[in-house]
């Protein structure tokens, strides 16, 4: 069964801290891995990773994929209260399915 | 604003009612999706449409009936729902099946 596991389930930090969120996966036909941020309703797209070892960066957020060890990390530096959200990891399957399999998410709370 | 809109944003319905959820994307995408998000569970794919054709039905009960009249619009027709169907229903679209998905704000459905 295809699965995506995120850790930790929740995390509380103070503004200015650096956090690392983890995502591991076991799937039959991997195409790419995606990160989303969900604050209230709509998950908003952050990154799509297809190749191992190539860091993607957007401001204070960065992410990297390891296809050998089957995991990805999302780093947030100099956290702000606006970073508080649920961060979702998902794996896009290839082949005929093209399904997006989501993890349960990591709830990040950034305190002032 | 992701370019994907959903209406209504909130819906309360009885188990004998018939209602429809609407999704519209203004991104020129060719693929559209319905997801269900229940409390403390991962986002769960329900249906996938690619160029108006259904390519995935993730074992969804027949009381949920999707309709995709064109690549910009997606509906989810609901009838004789159960209280356990109460959840956030999210619509998403993507340029094609192998690209990142952009989500709408969701419809919060409560079945009484």
Image (spheres, coloured by chain):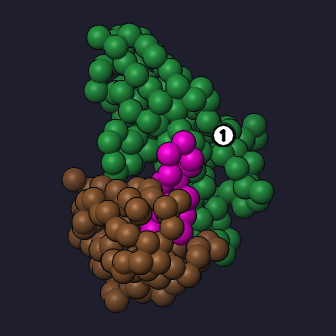
Chain colours: A green, B brown
Q: Position of residue B54 (x, y in %)?
A: 51, 84
Q: Residue at x 60, y 55 (%)?
A: A101
Q: Position of residue A111 (x, y in %)?
A: 34, 13
Q: Is residue A8 visible?
A: yes
Q: Which residues are magenta?
A: B34-46
Q: Is residue A3 above or below residue A98?
A: above
The magenta stretch spans residue A53 = no
The quarter of the rendered structure image containing the C terminus of chain B is: bottom left
Q: Residue at x 54, y 42 (%)?
A: B40
Secondary structure under the numbered disc 1 in the rendered image: strand
The residue that mark 1 highlights is A5
- The chain carrying label 1 is A
**Of B10 and B91, which appears nearest the observer?**
B10
Q: Residue at x 59, y 26 (%)?
A: A8
Q: Quadrant of residue B71?
A: bottom left
Q: Is residue A105 above or below residue A31?
A: above
Q: Position of residue A73 (x, y in %)?
A: 57, 31
Q: Residue at x 48, y 26 (%)?
A: A75
Q: Is residue B22 above or below residue B106?
A: below
């Amino acid at each position: 069964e295809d699965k995506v596991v995120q850790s930790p389930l929740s995390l509380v930090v103070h503004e200015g801290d650096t956090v690392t969120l983890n995502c591991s996966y076991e799937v039959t036909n991997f195409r790419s891995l995606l990160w989303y941020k969900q604050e209230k309703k709509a998950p908003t797209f952050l990154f799509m990773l297809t190749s191992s070892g190539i860091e993607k960066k957007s401001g204070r957020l960065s992410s990297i994929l390891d296809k050998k060890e089957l995991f990805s990390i999302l780093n947030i530096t100099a956290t702000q209260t606006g970073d508080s959200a649920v961060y979702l990891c998902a794996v896009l399957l290839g082949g005929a399915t093209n399904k997006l399999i989501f993890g349960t998410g990591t709830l990040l709370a950034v305190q002032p | 604003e992701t370019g994907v809109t959903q209406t209504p944003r909130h819906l309360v319905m009885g188990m004998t009612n018939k209602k429809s959820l609407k999704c519209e994307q203004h991104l020129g995408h060719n693929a559209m999706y319905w997801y269900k998000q229940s409390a403390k569970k991962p986002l769960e794919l329900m249906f996938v449409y690619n160029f108006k054709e259904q390519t995935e039905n993730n074992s969804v009960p027949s009381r949920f009936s999707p309709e995709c009249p064109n690549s910009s619009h997606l509906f989810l027709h609901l009838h004789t729902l159960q209280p356990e169907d109460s959840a956030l229903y999210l619509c998403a679209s993507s340029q094609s099946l192998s690209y990142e998905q952009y989500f709408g704000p969701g419809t919060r459905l409560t079945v009484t």
